[in-house]
Amino acid sequence: MRLRIALILATLCSIFPWCANAGKTDCAGSHQGCKPVKEDVDECALDPDICGDHLAICTNMHRGFHCECPDGYLPSPGINWKINVSVCTELDSMLPTKKDKRFRVDKVLEMVRNMTSGGLPLKTVSLLLDELADDDRKRLVKHRHEVLLSKKKLVSKLVERTSTRASKNFTTKTTEGEILSIGPNASLTGFPQLRIPSADVFLDIDLEGIAHKNNGSASVALVAYSDMQDILEVDLFSTEENTMKAIISKVVSATLEDVVNAELSNSVNFTLRHINNQSLDSLLGPQGLQGSDATVDFKTPNPNPCLTL
């Protein structure tokens, strides 16, 4: 009887988010379910059809579960899973044909713009990240800027809250990254380093100092995009001097997630490796995207193949 009550609570909470604060339940994110805090119930085993669609994959998590679609499928309607509403639909049936690359990418951008709050499973994020890579350099600079920002938005959906410390690494066909999250009970020694060794990208950041200004919690996502240096153009970047410009490193993004106060207590160090053989005399300093959503001031680069900012 006790087990049945726990299952009912979990199912209700998956459908009605307001039950997160009711009784002894604890909900986590829109794509997860919930269950009583003191009960370690495997909802997926108790009810294999709890997601509401026979193709959906149910994964049990601490204090909850989440539903996701198999490879090549996305939830619909909307890419945020809703219990007993969402169904897994083959991606190719939701998008224009691969011959219509522009329309296909535009459709994915529309999906990203219409995403609701809450997290997304890695399979969903990976599928959409790789679809956005199928673009060309003939598009307007504004469009390519939106592609990059949409990728960052998708990665942000992988962030999960924690009371201690949690790290997540992910790799897709075109994207590789690491997400580090800390909570009020985290214990850090020095500044943590996020790294993407295959892309020679490293980030040292005082995440604990940022967390202190945000109720003890903060997350940072470091991502390297293997395709973006071929899609972006130097027109996206502004410099004081009128010189020939070239992108000579991987395009990377470092984004603070789940924070209100993003003021830095200490400097942030990036280490990037040059991937193009440019003359050092004509080397530009690293540049940040211009605009209110992404402005960065960088130091002058050191004259060596591995650049630390």
Image (tube, rainbow, N blue to C red):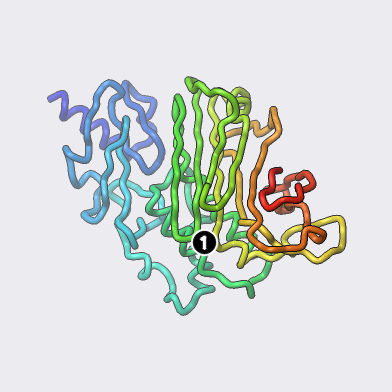
The image quadrant that residue 95 belongs to is bottom left
The one nearer the camera, 60 or 233, is 233
**Quadrant the N terminus occupies:** top left
Q: Which residue is mark 1?
A: 110
**Quadrant the C terminus occupies:** top right
Which residue corresponds to the image point at 60% horizontal and 29% vertical from the top-left? 191
Residue 174 falls left or right of residue 255: left
Residue sitting at the far front: 304
Mark 1 lies on a secondary structure that is helix
Task: Give x and y (percent) for residue 166.
Answer: 44, 33
The image quadrant that residue 140 belongs to is bottom right
> In this rendering, is residue 259 above or below 230?
above
Residue 216 falls left or right of residue 270: left
Q: Amino acid at mark 1?
A: Glu
The one nearer the camera, 11 or 40, is 40
Which residue corresponds to the image point at 59% horizontal and 43% vertical from the top-left? 202
Task: Give x and y (percent) for residue 155.
Answer: 50, 48
Residue sitting at the far right: 241
Residue 53 falls left or right of residue 208: left
Q: Bin the neighbour count of mark 1 within 10 Å (Cα to Cα): few under 14, some 14-19, many 20 and up.
A: few
Task: Give x and y (percent) for residue 34.
Answer: 31, 33
The image quadrant that residue 245 belongs to is bottom right
Which residue corresponds to the image point at 31% horizontal and 54% vertical from the top-left? 69
Residue sitting at the far left: 1
Which residue corresponds to the image point at 40% horizontal and 41% vertical from the top-left? 30
Count of numbered circles in the view: 1
